[in-house]
């Protein structure tokens, strides 16, 4: 884990470059506490609730306690977006969850409710549930199917789509880092490198710009572990949209749910 001063420098650099929205969670170690200290009253903060032990019985009191702890760590009077971490359709069917979530909807200290999901089925269930203002899903050059599944229904129900994992845990940054020994992954990443070369763009530029240009995506969440990366991200955001030919190349990279490009399968193998 980086030092607190290093983390604070990332936050202040982001603010200086016009980045105002920060996504965090209690599960990310000291992230909420550090972010609260570094941000002060600046920026917009999304955080999360929910973990395995909150999936049983009547755990509403624990849920409300988690929300208050997050507000305290973030030093915020309100939470701009509260997301359920790894929400599933099964969680949405729990009576205590539905009751508690309805209560949070009426809490003036929470400005929006969201769900962070995996896979098209749970993402679609979240969009259709009527319980969320935003849904956070995975999207990258090799795994585009979730957004494609929910784009139309999200627009019809006024649900905002945010995407994460655009660099696929660093595999699509083009920095030459070693890849997990997952069958098919190296071949898939090589396809991206070849496409990026044809598009005359760095891999990281194609990966991020493609997400920014994809219909239906409103927010693109990017993980940063060094201030210098913020300048790279900011320059890509300011760059021109992809051309029609480049967009066609992006669509051809999608592997339609291949487990080789699902980081959860990497952990299971490890």
Image (spheres, rainbow, N blue to C red):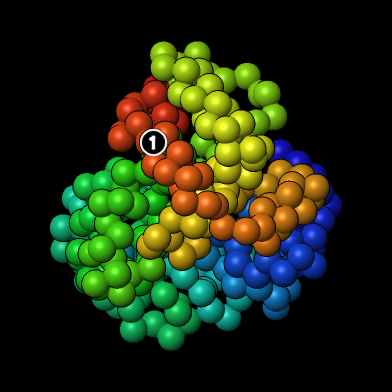
Q: Nearer the viewer, residue 185 or 79?
A: 185
Residue at 52%, 57% (x, y): give it: 212
Q: Nearer the viewer, residue 249 or 266?
A: 249
Number of callouts in the render? 1
Residue 54 to residue 180: above or below = below
Residue at 42%, 43% (x, y): give it: 248
Q: Please say whether residue 72 is visible from this viewpoint.
A: no
Q: Is residue 31 left or right of residue 161?
A: right
Residue 88 in the image: state x and y as whole percent: 26, 50
Residue at 31%, 34% (x, y): give it: 257
Q: Please say whether residue 228 is visible from this viewpoint.
A: yes
> Dot 1 corresponds to which residue?
252
Displayed quadrant of residue 207: top right
Q: Is residue 192 left or right of residue 151?
A: right
In the picture as drawn, the residue positioned furthest to the front comes out as 245
Residue 190 in the image: state x and y as whole percent: 53, 22
Q: Is residue 263 left or right of residue 226?
A: left
Please tell me how crowded label 1 is: few (under 14), some (14-19), or many (20+) other residues with Cα within 10 Å.
some
Q: Nearer the viewer, residue 6 or 103?
A: 6
Displayed quadrant of residue 114: bottom left
Residue 10 in the image: state x and y as whole percent: 76, 54
Q: Where is the N terminus found, in terms of image quarters?
A: top right
Q: Nearer the viewer, residue 162 or 73?
A: 162
Residue 129 in the image: state x and y as whole percent: 20, 65
Displayed quadrant of residue 266: top left
Residue at 45%, 77% (x, y): give it: 110
- Label 1 secondary element: loop
Residue 244 to residue 215: above or below = above
């Amino acid at each position: 884990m980086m030092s607190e001063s290093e983390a604070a420098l990332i936050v202040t650099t982001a603010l200086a470059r016009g980045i105002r929205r920060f996504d965090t969670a209690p599960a990310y170690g000291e992230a909420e506490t550090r972010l609260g200290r570094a941000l002060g009253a600046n920026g917009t903060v999304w955080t999360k609730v929910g973990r395995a032990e909150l999936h049983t019985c009547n755990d509403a009191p624990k849920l409300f306690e988690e929300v208050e702890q997050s507000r305290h760590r973030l030093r915020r009077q309100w939470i701009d977006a509260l997301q359920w971490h790894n929400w599933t359709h099964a969680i949405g069917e729990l009576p205590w969850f539905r009751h508690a979530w309805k209560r949070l909807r009426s809490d003036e200290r929470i400005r929006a409710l969201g769900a962070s999901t995996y896979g098209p089925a749970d993402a679609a269930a979240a969009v259709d549930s009527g319980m969320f203002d935003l849904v956070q899903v995975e999207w990258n050059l090799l795994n585009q199917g979730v957004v494609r599944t929910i784009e139309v229904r999200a627009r019809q129900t006024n649900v905002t789509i945010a995407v994460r994992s655009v660099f696929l845990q660093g595999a699509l940054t083009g920095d030459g880092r070693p890849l997990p020994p997952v069958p098919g992954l190296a071949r898939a990443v090589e396809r991206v490198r070849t496409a990026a070369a044809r598009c005359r763009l760095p891999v990281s530029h194609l990966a991020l710009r493609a997400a920014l240009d994809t219909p239906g995506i409103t927010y693109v969440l990017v993980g940063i572990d060094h201030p210098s990366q913020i300048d790279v991200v900011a320059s890509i955001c300011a760059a021109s949209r992809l051309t029609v030919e480049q967009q066609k190349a992006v669509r051809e990279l999608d592997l339609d749910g291949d487990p080789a490009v699902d980081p959860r399968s990497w952990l299971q193998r490890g």
